[in-house]
Image (spheres, helix red, strand yellow):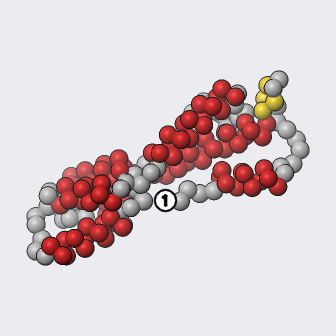
């Protein structure tokens, strides 16, 4: 993918196959952490800060709020953000402070959109004799497929 000079690059069928596998892996890397994973990470993070005076009910409600507020973030990115918060925060971080430390989401989404665009470009332009851009306008079905491919990811 990094070697493709632009979105207009027409990859070979072999490259397209590799891109399709890469798309699956990239989509999997965007899968949000499970609520139990989030609760475990927040619980572990809480051990690094002085204990607050909260009842079990309040602590449970707080964990639920953090699980909801961080529920769209992949586990590896969230884990790294919690580790950074532990090193950088003087007080237990709010959901927004943890989210600020969740770097990498935009890059993953951009990579996935680029992969999808390269696949779509191949599907649109590849000809058995080699790559040569087609000149006919997109059909309605092709426009609909392209819209699905380039639609923003739902987090």
Q: Is 146 above or below relative to 35?
A: above
Residue at position x 85%, y 38% in the image: 134
Residue 32: percent from the left, percent from the top?
Answer: 41, 54
Q: Is 128 above or below relative to 42?
A: above
Q: Is 128 above or below relative to 62?
A: above
Q: Is 94 above or below relative to 153?
A: below
Q: Say if residue 45 shows up in the picture.
A: no
For label 1, the residue is: 155
- Residue 98 falls left or right of residue 51: right
Residue at position x 49%, y 59% in the image: 155
Q: Element under label 1?
A: loop
Residue 137: percent from the left, percent from the top?
Answer: 87, 48
Residue 148: percent from the left, percent from the top?
Answer: 67, 54
Q: Say if residue 25 shows up in the picture.
A: yes
Report the residue that reaches farthest toward the top: 129
- Residue 52 falls left or right of residue 76: left
Residue 17: percent from the left, percent from the top?
Answer: 63, 31
Residue at position x 75%, y 55% in the image: 144
How many numbered discs sit on the rendered protein? 1
Quadrant of the image occupied by residue 66: bottom left
Q: Quadrant of the N terminus?
A: top right
Quadrant of the image occupied by residue 90: bottom left
What crowding class fits label 1: few (fewer than 14 Cα within 10 Å), some (14-19), or many (20 or more)? few
- Asked whether 86 or 141 is in front, the reply is 141
- Residue 118 falls left or right of residue 45: right
Residue at position x 25%, y 50% in the image: 83
């Amino acid at each position: 993918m990094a070697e493709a000079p632009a979105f207009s690059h027409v990859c070979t069928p072999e490259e397209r196959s590799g891109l399709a596998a890469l798309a699956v892996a990239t989509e999997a890397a965007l899968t949000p952490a499970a609520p139990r994973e989030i609760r475990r990470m927040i619980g572990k993070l809480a051990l690094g800060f002085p204990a607050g005076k909260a009842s079990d009910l309040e602590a449970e409600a707080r964990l639920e709020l953090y699980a909801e507020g961080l529920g769209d973030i992949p586990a590896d990115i969230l884990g790294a953000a919690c580790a950074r918060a532990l090193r950088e925060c003087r007080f237990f971080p709010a959901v927004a402070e943890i989210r600020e430390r969740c770097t990498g989401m935009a890059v993953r989404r951009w990579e996935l959109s680029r992969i999808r665009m390269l696949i779509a470009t191949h599907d649109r332009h590849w000809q058995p004799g080699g790559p040569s851009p087609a000149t006919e306008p997109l059909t309605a079905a092709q426009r609909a497929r392209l819209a699905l491919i380039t639609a923003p990811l739902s987090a």
